Amino acid sequence: MMGYAERREDLARGREVGWLRTGDLATRDPEGYYRITGRLRRMSKIAGIRIGHDAVEAGLRAQGIAAAVVGDDKTIFAAYTADQDEDSVREALAGLTALPVQSLQVRRTEALPRLTSGKLDYEAVRSSFAASCATTSRDIAEAFRHAFFPTPVDERDSFVSLGGDSLRHVLLSMEIERRLGAVPPDWQKLTVSELGRMARSCRGRLSSIDIEHLIRALAILFVVVQHATLWPVPVGSASLVVLVGYGLARFQSEALIAGRLRPLVRPLMLVLVPYYLILLGFAIGWGEIPWASVLLIANFGYGNPADHTMLPYLYWFVEAFVQMTLVFAVLFGMPWVRRRAMRDGFRFGLVLLAAALALRLVGPTLWPIGGRQIFTLPWVFYLAVFGWCVVFANTDGRRVLLLGLAAVTMSAMAYLGGNWIGSWVRYEAQVLVIAALLFMPRLRLPQRMVAMILLLAAASFHIYLVHRLVPEYFLEDLEPARSPALAAMLAIASGVGLGLMTFRLQNIGLQWLREWRKTAVTAYARLPEKDPTMI
């Protein structure tokens, strides 16, 4: 411990220091010998656990993994050159540190960065991870700004604080999964900056997903298959109605109870803008305006597709969605309704469910329109109320009670709906949907499957709008009677494909609009100030 030698002659000098604070860490064995184990600077304390980076490097090296390990008091970073995949190295790192994977980031590299002296360049490793996190943070912020355009988004905002809805929830879930490699539980409560700090290298073989998204993806596939094969069991549309109430309760109930109805407008615009574009296309093709569909009342028996006074029957869901949203808006516009919902959302939901079921039973009598009554609001509104009640069933007793009510109600509806196999399949499937939402709100699936499910769920409304355009207007020459199987497969594939394309085009259009708005605002800000007296 003689100090530092700067030239050859210094080596002949004796000891000139009494104590030298090196920052090294060491252990002392029973015989009094010391062994250097690391550096004080190369230490992290995460969740109360002290972790020496050098010790972790040594542990990885013992497993045949050459790595450079750095970190802070939130995350351990490891760059490595071994042949193992990132999942294996992350598992090894988790075993050595006893930390959850959310606190571990790994990246495979061709060579570890080194200084001219040959030592590992830990600052370069740290900088590469910091740059990656910064890019991820910008990506997440960009995804939020795109989803909530034109509402300004700050890094302190969260999905909940911005007043998100179910349509934006599935869209952002897809973007977060793509950018982070996983969808964190309750991500909607995290700020944009907190999400941005979750690095992409937290990717694992499995990812968790909201069961709502799986139900939505399966439901839209059921709708497409039903219309392509004339399978008379509308399982998918009924499930989508349940999700309408579930989404309102989960993401917009706080705003509704507070008397803020504006958050309901955003999801309506996401639905109505593409709907009216489709309507415009039909109007141009027909040379007539389907006024019943323009006014969103065709599902009550007004108009007929044959005389071009309404859109084809499948668009009833859009009208019912708007009508259900308006019903909730009217209800929560009343202070006494808000007070009851604020006291206990579940009890309020049960009262609303009783009223909706009464409306379902007397509706056909009050509005006798024959078979078209299945498209009306009284026929389906109780399904949405079941979705609302699921969110507020916050105890095991309430969940069991609601599931029991669902089983009894759906069995009664199956019997009243004709008491045939299709009716029973349709309604009993909703019992399974409600049970899944109640008792299995999230599940873990392979990441590739999660990505596919989120894409289908995010594009579900676009698929619904356009999935019959190609089969009915461009595939008529295939003569389905000769090959019904081929016609059905082409109808399903074209319907889903066109829906995904439409979803993509809408995102491109919104991105262009946002960039144009940003450019216009910047250009306006650069204009010279004008004399107010000249205006």
Image (spheres, rainbow, N blue to C red):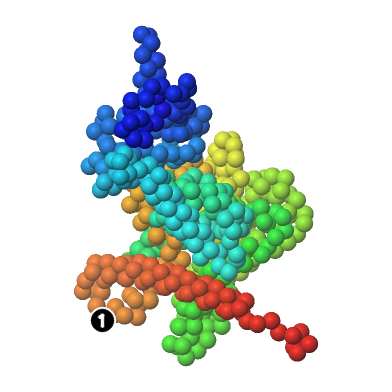
Tell me what residue is drawn at x 53 percent, y 48 percent.
Answer: 194
Q: Is residue 246 visible?
A: no
Please tell me which residue lies in front, 88 or 402.
Answer: 88
* Quarter assignment of residue 125: top left
Residue 105 horizontal/vertical position (percent): 39, 42
Please tell me which residue lies in front, 357 or 344.
Answer: 344
Tell me what residue is drawn at x 75 percent, y 59 percent.
Answer: 334
Residue 124 horizontal/vertical position (percent): 38, 47
Disc 1 marks which residue? 477
Residue 193 horizontal/vertical position (percent): 54, 52
**Quarter of the figure that contains the C terminus:** bottom right
Tell me what residue is drawn at x 34 percent, y 51 percent.
Answer: 449
Q: Is residue 403 visible?
A: yes
> Mark 1, residues whose alpha carbon is within 10 Å: few (<14), some, or many (≥20)?
few
Please tell me which residue lies in front, 120 or 52.
Answer: 120
Q: Which amino acid type is marked by label 1? A: Asp
**Farthest-out residue, left:** 482
Q: Is residue 405 above or below residue 300?
A: above
Tell me what residue is drawn at x 53 percent, y 80 percent.
Answer: 303
**Quarter of the figure that contains the N terminus:** top left
Q: Is residue 23 left or right of residue 406?
A: left
Residue 96 horizontal/vertical position (percent): 36, 29
Please tell me which residue lies in front, 290 or 498.
Answer: 498
* Local SS, label 1: helix
Total numbered labels placed on residues in the image = 1
